[in-house]
Image (cartoon, helix red, strand yellow):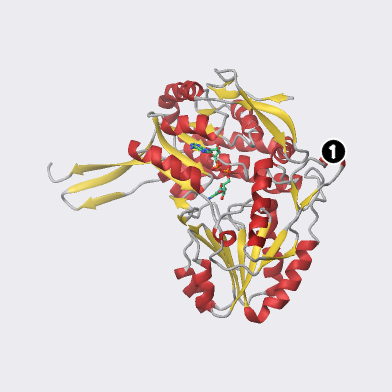
Amino acid sequence: MQILANYINGLHTPPRNGRYLDNFEPATGKMYGQIPDSDADDVQAAVDAAKAAFPAWSNTALESRHDILRAIADGIMERLDELAEAESRDSGKTISTARNIDIPRAALNFKFFATALLHFGSESYQMPGTALSYTLRQPLGVVGCISPWNLPLYLFTWKIAPALAAGNCVIGKPSEVTPLTAALLGEICQKAGLPPGVLNIVHGNGPRAGASLVAHPEVKAISFTGSTRAGAEIARVAAPMFKKLSLELGGKNPNLIFADCHYERMLETTVRSSFNNQGQICLCGSRIYVEKSIYERFRADFVAQVQALKVGDPSHPGSRLGAVVSQAHFEKVKSYIQLAQEEGGKILCGGKSLDLGGELSGGWYLEPTVIEGLSIHCRSNQEEIFGPVVTLQPFDTEAEALALANGTPYGLSATLWTNDLARVHRLTQSLQAGIVWVNTWMLRDLRTPFGGVKHSGIGREGGWDALRFFTEPKNVTYATDFD
Ligand code: NAD
């Protein structure tokens, strides 16, 4: 059985209270390890280490910082197979998703911000003959990075890499549901030469370890990705302490499909955007709206392709969907499928859990599920399900499609399928979302701002936005009107 430790001041450290949480394997439903059930004492030790490391790290030459972050990226790729296996085992995602998407992207996050830190600048303004003003961009000090279970190492590093690049010392709190690759990251950072205390990793649950980090007065900023519920709780605690906050929260993303789109490309992409990672990507399109003239055709083709998706052992390269992440999440998604039927929805395919037999018979497997006949107002179309479940609905006009797309409290992303350029410009202006994809999905350019509006959060990650978040601007005005 695997027993993980916290990573504090460069040392693998057991929780001070001696308590542990069980860690389960979604593929089998069996417990296979334990992680520290850390509390405020462990967070305090991490803050002490981070504070002690900060003066030297924030003054480290940019080239040296770059070299260390690049070495971390290389270290991740050197252990690609091991990390992919750990990620798949811990989260239930397929090994091919972990190997081809999650782990390479974690390495790329470090590579990207290693380079970005060399080019990051700030503004200056002149008042001729009067003054020169310039902006210092200073690291904040000790910052907290809290991440969810759906893209464990990918999202953990998406926060940690820019925080370190900007010269901060970090306390990372990975999801208690998927702690394994974060624990391995500690080893990789150590080998890459990251000084002790610069990155500390504290395991544990949200209400204890996470909440202690958020409430700690010496943690200057919280970068959080997770549910809207937890984001609201974090804001409630952190806002009166005037911490910087970046909140990447839930979504209920619409997919608008017009008859003039490139049909084959749309169909293939819509299957992916619905069910990749068992629908557990914050960017998955869970509400699919299709122009009436192609609705029947789309429904038939889409359902046929979804029925052909193979749900199987996540460690098997032939599996297209693996297991959902936990028993609690499995029960939640099933309850929404039940609710959708009670609300009048008709299941076109899927809708049931699967027993894959043998070793896998206790695993948390769900059929990819397509439902139609639900109004925008019902809970199944308003609340985030975050599983392999999508709803279909036809629309007549562009105005109706827009109203449906904007008709939830969320606003993370939207996908638009059309070849009408004027329509693209009209709709991208009016869609209430932080990210709009046109004729593609989840194509990421790491320089672009990433984040949501409405209940999907505040702040933006990526590119300069992330480096600006992790630094404080200080304006200096220097008089130039005397000799
Ligand atoms: P969650 O909110 O339950 O947990 C996320 C993290 O926050 C975990 O590490 C958890 O331990 C911690 N946490 C929970 N309560 C806390 C508290 N009060 N104080 C401090 N930390 C706390 O979310 P989850 O179930 O792990 O992840 C799924 C959610 O994440 C979905 O809602 C999904 O949409 C969202 N998500 C959003 C994005 C995005 O970019 N917007 C990306 C991925 C996932």
Q: In this rendering, is residue 429 above or below 367? A: below
Residue farthest along the right direction in this orientation: 358
**Residue 256's x, y, as percent?**
58, 70
What residue is rendered at 61% in x and 61% in y?
A: 285
- Residue 259 appears in the rendering: no
What residue is rendered at 23% in x and 46% in y?
A: 132
Residue farthest along the bottom direction in this orientation: 293
Residue farthest along the front direction in this orientation: 342
Task: Please tell me in which quadrant of the rendered image residue 201 appears.
Answer: top right
The residue beneath circle 1 is 359
Task: Please tell me in which quadrant of the rendered image residue 259 appears.
Answer: bottom right
**Residue 162's x, y, as percent?**
49, 41
Residue farthest along the left direction in this orientation: 482
Q: Is residue 31 left or right of residue 20?
A: right
Q: Under 8 Å from ligand 1: the CB of mark 1?
A: no
From the viewer's side, name the closer residue of 344 and 259: 344
Q: Quadrant of ligand 1?
A: top right
Which residue type carries mark 1?
Answer: Glu
Task: Please tell me in which quadrant of the rendered image residue 55 appears.
Answer: top left
Badge 1: residue crowd in 10 Å (few <14, some 14–19, many ≥20): few
**Residue 90's x, y, as percent?**
70, 37
